[in-house]
Each structure stands twice: as structure tokens, then as C-alpha cells.
């Protein structure tokens, strides 16, 4: 059984994240989308809200589950008996940081490998930060996130928009 973890903040999940989930779900028997519960970082959505949105957005994938974790990713991966971590690479600027984390995680836990998927070209500019910034000014985010979660995002900024 090949289990992989796709970790992240997902605050909120974007089409870029969903593209990585769709593609990596085909590579593994079980993919766990794991939301980092980091109380030190201020987030727009609570962990519970992010988990619930991701569950709704991945409901069609039978081998994808959604969870949250605290602490070190490698400790969580060991607990879940996952041999792989999945990360998306958008641009060269992502690479240096991701390489460092992947190498550190591998040193800490040699049984775990990080698999990088390059983000589809049409989402290479996209990030949760961009979505939050646009939404906070009432900007159009329909090309960034699924329709189901758009009202939830505007709601966080008290914006009433169709
Ligand atoms: O979506 P993000 O914010 O880019 O995801 C970052 C994440 C959650 C993958 C990363 O911050 C993480 O793994 N945090 C857990 C703590 C940890 O294991 N850090 C690694 C230090 S080398």
C-alpha cells in the first residue's frame, strides 16, 4: 500500500492545490491531504474549516482523505505509515526552499521521499495569498478557486457578492 501525504496550509485551497491532488491521487493507493495546524500562524480559515472545505472538494476521489496535523511533518508521516510527501512546484523561486525542506525531512526520516509535481502552467501564478488579497478587495476569484467555496471566502471579509 503506497500512502502519500500532501501537506500544506490550504488557506484556502485553490485550483492549483486541486490540480496537484487530482494528479497525485493517481500515483498512490492512498493520498492524505494534511492541513497544518499551526497556532503561531494567523490564518483566514480555522483548521476545521479548511479540512471541511477540502473534504467537500475531494469527495469524488475514493482514495483521498483529509486530515490535519500538528508538529513535524515527518513525525506525522511516520504515524500514518506514509512513505511519500507530495509538494507542488510552481516556479524556480519555490525550488530552493522546497529542496531544503525535502532534504531535511529525508535526513530526519530516510524512509520518506518527497515527490515534486510541477504545477500545471495555467495555475503557476496562483497562491492562497493571491486569493486572499484579491478577495479582500472584492476582486473576482472565480478563476482561482471552486465556486462552492467562493461565498465562504468573501464571507470572511464581510463582502456580499454574487
Ligand atoms: O502550504 P504551505 O504553507 O507551503 O505548507 C508548508 C508545510 C505545511 C508543508 C510546512 O510548513 C511543514 O511541513 N510544516 C510542518 C513542520 C515541519 O515539519 N517543518 C519542516 C521543517 S524542515
Image: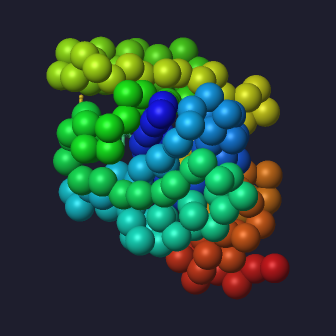
Colouring scheme, one of rainbow, by chain, secondary structure, one colour: rainbow
The quarter of the image holding the C terminus is bottom right
Residue 49 shown left or right of residue 146 in the figure: left
Vertical position of residue 77 compared to residue 55: above or below:
above
Q: Residue furthest front?
A: 1
Q: Residue at x 79, y 59 (%)?
A: 142
Q: Nearer the viewer, residue 18 or 132?
A: 18
- Camera-nearest residue between 157 and 18: 18
Q: Residue at x 47, y 47 (%)?
A: 32
Q: Is residue 107 left or right of residue 93?
A: left
Q: Where does residue 140 sit, x and y in percent of width and height?
A: 77, 61
Q: Is residue 33 visible?
A: yes
Figure quadrant of residue 154: bottom right
Q: Total of numbered circles in the picture?
A: 0
Residue drawn 78% across the image and 33% down it: 122
Q: Is residue 56 left or right of residue 65?
A: right
In the foreground, 53 or 161: 53
Residue 59, image x and y in percent?
66, 62
- The answer, for residue 98, to whether it is visible in the render is no
Q: Is residue 101 above or below residue 122?
A: above
Residue located 47% across and 72% down the image = 49
Residue 16: image location, x then y, percent: 66, 41
The quadrant of the picture showing ligand 1 is: top left
Amino acid at each position: 500500500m503506497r500512502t502519500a501525504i500532501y501537506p500544506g496550509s490550504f488557506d484556502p485551497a485553490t485550483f492549483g492545490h486541486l490540480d496537484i491532488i487530482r494528479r497525485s491521487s493517481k500515483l498512490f493507493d492512498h493520498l492524505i491531504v494534511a492541513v497544518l495546524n499551526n497556532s503561531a500562524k494567523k490564518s483566514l480559515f480555522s483548521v476545521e474549516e479548511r479540512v471541511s472545505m477540502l473534504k467537500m472538494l475531494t469527495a469524488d476521489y475514493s482514495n483521498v482523505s483529509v486530515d490535519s496535523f500538528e508538529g513535524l511533518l515527518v513525525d506525522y508521516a511516520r504515524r500514518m505509515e506514509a512513505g511519500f510527501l507530495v509538494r507542488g512546484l510552481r516556479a524556480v523561486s519555490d525550488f530552493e526552499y522546497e529542496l531544503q525542506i525535502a532534504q531535511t525531512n529525508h535526513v530526519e526520516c530516510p524512509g520518506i521521499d518527497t515527490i515534486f509535481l510541477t504545477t500545471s502552467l495555467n495555475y503557476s501564478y496562483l497562491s492562497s495569498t493571491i486569493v486572499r488579497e484579491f478577495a479582500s478587495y472584492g476582486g473576482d476569484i472565480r478563476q482561482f478557486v471552486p465556486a462552492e467555496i467562493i461565498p465562504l471566502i468573501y464571507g470572511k471579509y464581510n463582502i456580499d457578492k454574487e
